[in-house]
Image (spheres, helix red, strand yellow):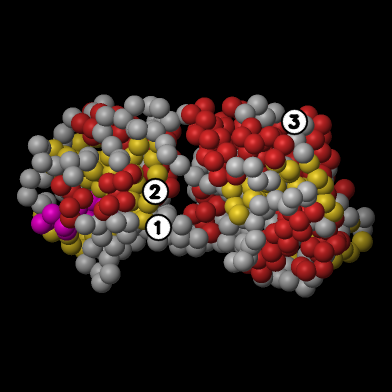
Amino acid sequence: MELWHNRILVLDFGSQYTQLIARRIREAHVYSQILPCTVPLASILAYRPQGIVLSGGPSSVYEKKAPSVPKELFDLGIPILGICYGMQLVTHLSGGEVAKSKHREYGRSDLTIDDRSNLFKDIGEGGSTVVWMSHGDRIERMPPGFRSIAHTANSPIAAMKRDDHKRRIYCLQFHPEVVHTPEGTQILRNFVYDICGCKPTWTMQSYVETAIRDIREKVGKERVICALSGGVDSSVAAALTHRAIGDQLTCIFVDNGLLRAGEKEQVRQTFAQQLHLNLRLLDASDSFLAKLKGVIDPERKRKIIGKQFIEQFEAEAKKKSGGATFLVQGTLYPDVIESVSFKGPSATIKTHHNVGGLPARMKLKLIEPLRELFKDEVRVLGKELGLPDEIVWRQPFPGPGLAIRVLGAVTKERLTILRAAESILDQEIRAAGLYREIWQSLAVLLPIRTVGVMGDQRTYEHVVALRAVTSLDGMTADWAKIPNDVLGKMSNRIINEVKGVNRVVYDISSKPPATIEWE
């Protein structure tokens, strides 16, 4: 996708924070793309970046096969920002010295700023600011031409720069992209605006124009089907594709038996009656549940569900007059990052059915117009396309549906219990005015039973775990501090109204180390 003249390239060295760098830059309305650090120099030049960011990473520069970049990168005259491992790599390749720190520096640190120009303009009232460190190596000796611009108690060279007629290179030992560095966003904006000279031209309006053009060029006169779930991702993907090709698009909603209460009717009302899209509703619940019978492993669940979805879509494509050639999916950037090593050597966390769960020989060609977007960008895009608030602000719902919230074997009985519990959770979250504040809320049916007393009778029934998190992008999350009275009402209603449940617990784990979903 040919995008805007103002753009920053992020080279990924394997940090789990890499995507946050791109996100923060985009929040400044400057387009940023992530490429693996192994990309050839010619590809970097072809991208025509106005600035380059070298991400952090888990490696040491002295390890065998440590990721690196060509030294020629530093001689291009393009401003460079090295973060954590990126700083250490710049030092190593430029003739400085990196060594193991006597004390690993992880977490909050007080940064003393020695030079408040350029990168640190308007940063650190009183000469210091709070930053987030995460490193075991540190800079012992700077390369020739560099000078220190900030330090901490443990890192005498916590930031450095070389800014002359030959090179414009800035380096940070800390992570400005994380929320734990309060002034990190401004530091990145100083780099993007003042040092790289970028203008804030990245908007969802401009994205719509570019995406529509690309979809039309790719599709031509062919027919397209869209895997529609009713969630914000697939809904925005469908609306965007429909804006591009009109009635060439048919949306398919598959009832896989793993949906929440009332989901099918909501989709019918919104997309067929309100937005007037071509919509086909398929009931495939029996086939999905049959394939999932006795399956406990969550990765097997995802693979099975992904395969079943594709089989449904391919069968439906054949029924259409002339057949469909393309399949639209609402894949987002975080889906890709967590599923596969897409643009860098980051670790695989879990498979998403619409990324890693696709069969290798799928006959339909993919259209993923949201693949490079974060969730908040998708919501803005949805508003730009005129989607109603109940769709745009809907909380995320996983592609495999309730199958990964029923821990253990998936049965109709256990799905009925979970569906009722989730419905109560949703009602109470909305009634408390917390729906927009919470990133995601869900119920999980645990594969255990506990002893209880109801009506003077001993019970031995199911346990439901409630989970709610706050987040900016879904990549990191904190557990939501729901008021005790609201939690109490949820628990009371679930135990009294959902047959088969005698205990409710609340998950207070953050991400990381936990994920948002339990499976």
- Between circles 2 and 3, the one closer to the viewer is 3
Residue 407, image x, y percentages: 71, 64
Residue 289 appears left or right of 328: right
Task: Give the residue at x 26% y 33%.
Answer: 196
Expressed as whole percent of the image width and height from the top left, the position of residue 97 reads 13, 59
Indicate whether 10 appears above or below 429: below
Q: Are marks 1 and 2 in contact (CB under 8 Å)?
A: yes
- Picture quadrant of residue 409: bottom right
Q: Whole-Å distance between the Cαs marked 3 and 1? A: 38 Å
Residue hosting label 3:
275
Residue under label 1, please give it: 344
Closer-to-camera residue (494/172): 172
- Asked whether 94 falls inside the magenta stretch, the response is yes
In three-dimensional space, the C-alpha distance between marks 2 and 3, rounded to whole angstroms, equals: 34 Å
Mark 2 sits on what residue? 34
Q: What residue type is labelled 3?
A: Leu
Task: Say what secondary structure mark 2 lies in.
Answer: strand
From the viewer's perspective, tell me whether residue 171 is left or right of residue 331. Answer: left
